[in-house]
Amino acid sequence: MAKVALVSGANKGIGFACVRALCKQLKDDNAVYLTARNPELGKKAVADLEKEGLKPRFHQLDITDQRSVEALRDHVKKEHGGLDIVINNAGFAFRLDDKASAAEQAAVSCQVNYFGTARVFDVLSPILRPHSEYASYSKKFYCRVVNVSSMTAKGVLKRLDPELKKEFQNTSTRNEVDMLVKRYIELMASGEAEKYGFTTVSNCGFSKLGLCALTRVQNSDMQKDLNRPGINVYSVCPGYVATDMSSYKGPKTPDEGADTLIWLALQPQGTTMGSGEFFADRKVISLL
Ligand code: NDP
């Protein structure tokens, strides 16, 4: 059975590099979807990869738009029956000199990076397949979801009030993580975030911390689905990568930034290594 993979926010940067790597590693009888919120930019990115001899497919995806995510799910289900790899790469960070208020920055960062990524999982997880046999190889690939987070999550966790830090580390349900993120947004809006133990240092970092906690919960929920064994969910920091988001600073190229994401997405059959954990440079990073 052909494998179906998709990458969000793939018109540029690390997402684009992920599509390139998946196209190279999965070959043409599989379907690799380059998705982007702007169809024009997405189709241009597909054309750029075609010039490299690769054959990604395109579908529109805005992770903040429920209908857009559902349209993608319906398309994939109709065309392929299911989905094997999701790299939730789409993300947003305000520039350091952005004039938006701290409250607005906190809300927008969480809406895109946390709730947007959560929405993609909510809508697409029912069509994730437990595994598929890839004809050209003797081994089986299992289904993988990779949430692109950031090392700033660890820095933010360190700065939380100890009680709040414990609360984060002990979250075991989706609702508990959602409530923590909502509390942060509300306290940022009322100017009381620090008073209640949150840090105002990095709104993007906070949204990514939420994403790491969410990943753990998503993974644990998938492990409980006995009809679909072996579906692993990971969070990962790509490193400091020269992309639009970093104003082209950072020592890694997008291809290098994609390395751990692809390594996790293609983990072979039966691996339970680091399932639910946060990774960087192919290693588990402790969030304790
Ligand atoms: P880029 O800014 O180059 O790319 C971000 C991508 O996300 C773009 O395609 C953008 O689309 C897309 N995007 C933003 N909002 C949405 C949305 N609502 N729906 C769908 N797509 C959306 O950044 P990077 O390639 O650097 O970042 C990729 C991921 O890596 C992000 O999650 C980021 O947080 C993470 N990361 C990056 C680091 C770095 O050093 N670069 C460090 C740590 C983490 P559009 O072009 O339309 O805006």
Image: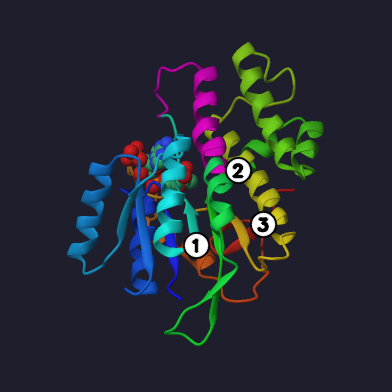
Disc 2 marks a residue whose amino acid type is Leu
Q: Rounded to the nearest whole Å, what is the CA distance between mark 1 and mark 2? A: 24 Å
Mark number displayed over residue 276: 3
The x, y position of residue 148, in whole percent, is 51, 50
Disc 1: which residue: 82
Disc 2: which residue: 211
Name the residue at 60% across, 63% down: 283
Q: Picture quarter containing residue 208?
A: top right
Name the residue at 74% across, 39% down: 168
Judge from the rendering whether residue 148 lies leftward or rightward of residue 214; answer left or right.
left
The x, y position of residue 194, in whole percent, is 69, 20
Disc 1 marks a residue whose amino acid type is Gly
Judge from the rendering whether residue 55 lies leftward or rightward of residue 200; answer left or right.
left
Q: Residue furthest front?
A: 78
Mark 1 or mark 2: which is in front?
A: 1
Disc 3 marks a residue whose amino acid type is Gly
Q: Earlier in the sequence, mark 1 or mark 2?
A: 1
Magenta residues, start to end: 95-118
What main secondary structure does the magenta stretch of the protein show? helix
Q: Earlier in the sequence, mark 3 or mark 1?
A: 1
Mark number displayed over residue 111: none
Q: Rounded to the nearest whole Å, what is the CA distance between mark 2 and mark 3? A: 11 Å
Q: Rounded to the nearest whole Å, what is the CA distance between mark 3 and mark 1? A: 22 Å
